Image (cartoon, rainbow, N blue to C red):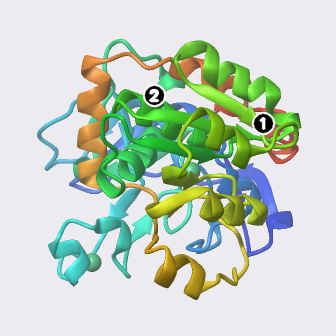
Amino acid sequence: MKALVQKTEEKQSIVFEEVEEPSPLPQEVKVKVIAAGICGTDVHGISSLRPPVILGHEFAGVITEVGSEVRQVKVGDRVTSETTVFSCGTCPYCVEGHFNLCPYRKGIGSGVNGAFADYIVIPEKALHVLPSTLSFEEGAILEPFACAVHAVIEQAKVEEGEKVLVFGPGPLGILVAWLARFCGAQVLLAGKAEDRGRMERAERYLPPLSTVNVDAIDLEGYIRDHIDPYGMDTVFECSGALPAVYMGLRLLKKRGRFFQLGILHREVPIDFDEYLFSRELVLSGSRTQKKSSWEKAMAILNEHSFPLRELITHVLPLERWQEGFALTQRREALKVILKPGV
Ligand SMILES: [Zn+2]
Ligand SMILES: [Zn+2]
């Protein structure tokens, strides 16, 4: 089969090549990949990457073969999968259900072969059956949706009336903003001038959600005059841009909470006296998702409709991956979906 393989740590080593088709172990299924989304980490780098490995961790497809011990799913089922396919089960993180933090964790598309291929094998326990209302393309967005559930519902536990500021109107930032709205928060999504199209999409489909262009307005004054003179309760930094980190810290009210979701790829000097001692801010983060995030995500999507398809701006055959990666890198695309075998 054809697959997109990263050969070494270097992004330049990605090649689209012929590889051996995988076959499932007794507790695994083989899935024909129908749609797989490009994530920013595919383009900019994943810290847990163990090359050579097939990339791709956001996907949906159809089961074509099941291992001898598989009981809950069958050939023909439409499925997606959690990213974590191996965790040790015995470390203190696993014992408490924080599988995303297990030091021995392996994820698809980084630690083990991923979904930018005709087929992928997945342990039965990591699978989720797609709600019948979702297409395969939308199914490929469930992974970032589960990441947003982990951030908004599990980490921040956003509540009704909370004032939330989200930086970075990429797919994850928009999903975080939508979910915070869903939890009843008053949400402000902040981006740059070049993000106007993305912010219009975010705003059009789940009002009332306000978006602001940080290049065009004085965000501090805007929040003081229109939202709360004391500042915001909670900030989610999804852009990975240093100025957004500092702006977010400044715009929080005392005792506010800051969650880092974007990857900065650098150390960030922070004034502890000002932010931690004087203002009692809480700084935290949100790393990917875990089983409980997926269960909550599936429960929400079985009951409520989110306009996930509006995040998809491009659908390309897998062999045109370079175009998709370039669109993602240049931030011209929101979510690019690659389709193997077309
Ligand atoms: Zn991702
Ligand atoms: Zn563990």
Q: x, y percentage for residue 109? A: 55, 57
Residue beneath the point at 67% across and 30% down:
211
Secondary structure, mark 2, is: helix
* Quadrant where the image shows the N terminus: top right
* Quadrant where the image shows the C terminus: top right
Q: x, y percentage for residue 176? A: 50, 40
Residue beneath the point at 74% across and 74% down:
8
Q: x, y percentage for residue 74? A: 22, 30
* Residue at mark 2 to residue at mark 1: CA–CA distance: 21 Å
Residue carrying label 2 = 139
Callout 1 environment at 10 Å: few (<14), some (14 to 19), or many (20+)? many
Q: Report whether 297 appears left or right of 275.
A: left
Residue beneath the point at 61% across and 32% down:
226
Regarding residue 293, the answer to whether it shows in the image is yes
Q: Report whether 38 appears left or right of 301.
A: right
Q: Amino acid at mark 2?
A: Gly
**Cβ of mark 1 under 8 A from ligand 1:** no
Secondary structure, mark 1, is: helix
Residue beneath the point at 38% across and 60% down:
84
Residue carrying label 1 = 319
Q: Amino acid at mark 1?
A: Glu
Dot placed on the residue nearer the N-terminal end, 2 or 1: 2
Callout 2 environment at 10 Å: few (<14), some (14 to 19), or many (20+)? many
Viewer-nearest of discs 2 and 1: 2
Find ligand 2 in the image and state its quadrant.
bottom left
- Relative height, residue 194 to residue 43 (above, below): above
Q: Report whether 216 appears left or right of 131.
A: right
